[in-house]
Amino acid sequence: METTFDNKVVLVTGASSGIGEAIALLFAKCGAKLSLVGRNEKNLQDVAARCAAEKGIQPFVIVADLSTDEGCEKTAKDTLDVLVNNAGISARTCIQVTDMKIFDDVFNTDVRGVYNLTRLLVPALIESKGNIVNISSISGTVVVVGSLPYGMAKAALDHFTRLVALELAPKGVRVNAVSPGLTVSNIVKRITGYTEEEYQNWLKKGEKTVPMGEVCVGEDIAKMVVHLASDHSRLVTGAIVQVDGGLQFCGGLNIYSEQIK
């Protein structure tokens, strides 16, 4: 069965690069009418152009910081079928060296922003009998030194997913999450300052810890997001779906711990 989102409005946050970019491109291939949200206007416009090239449908670009109330209010639209909460930031730190600014920065985007934007868009999703897919991380379930407060934020997002799924199920709105493992993106380079060569070496080291022997790429996550958002998953709600090659079972994320001294 072909997955199609013809005439469906899909909002993807954090769409300017990495996993969000891959999600946007796959929804574009499926015929969705896209709203793309992010902070980097140039990157968003580039992604929007690539999406438009798929089926000739021009996405609506929204430059906004979802850690703020103003950004969430700017993003919230009246018509919506699918909300993909992908925007997020990370930090490599631990309780001995962290400060409250790091905590606030991570939680304002990864938890508060998701909470606020979802709150604003729930009426539209109830009207359309739409659904929500949150992008979490196995850091929310795998305990790793150095994953504070990112791991805390993703654990909160997982529970938010389950709670809101139960709340909205009687309204016909499904809520699920995809939990990536090691995935090729820019987020690790941002928080470590790795050069491209250092990052590639890090990925090679990381893939040795993955039972299936490969790290994820953005399209691996995007395919699961589209599947959960589609009618193929019409009775799936409250699920936290790992896409990680089995990494959560073996504690492979401890490669992160080496970065915290």
Image: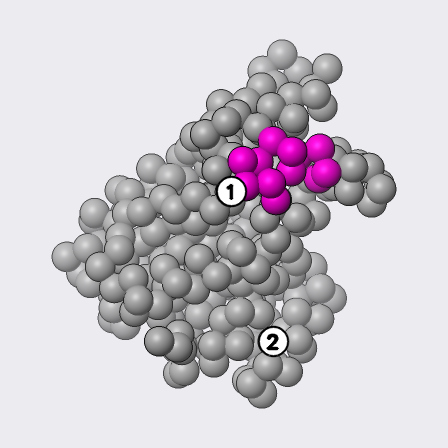
Q: How many marks?
A: 2
Q: Is residue 51 above or below residue 153?
A: below
Q: Is residue 25 magenta?
A: no
Q: Is residue 90 above or below residue 44?
A: above
Closer to the observer: label 2 or label 1?
A: 1
Q: Residue at x 20, y 63 (%)?
A: 172
Where in the figure is residue 120, as x and y percent of width and height? Answer: 37, 58
Q: Residue at x 64, y 55 (%)?
A: 18
Query: What are the residue bounds of the magenta stretch?
Result: 203-214
Q: Quadrant of residue 227?
A: bottom left
Q: Residue at x 52, y 25 (%)?
A: 251
Check residue 245 in the rendering and tell me which mark sits there, or answer none. 1
Q: Is residue 205 magenta?
A: yes
Q: Is residue 207 visible?
A: yes
Quarter of the figure that contains the C terminus: top right
Check residue 51 in the rendering and tell me which mark sits there, or answer none. 2
Where in the figure is residue 218, as x and y percent of width and height? Answer: 59, 56
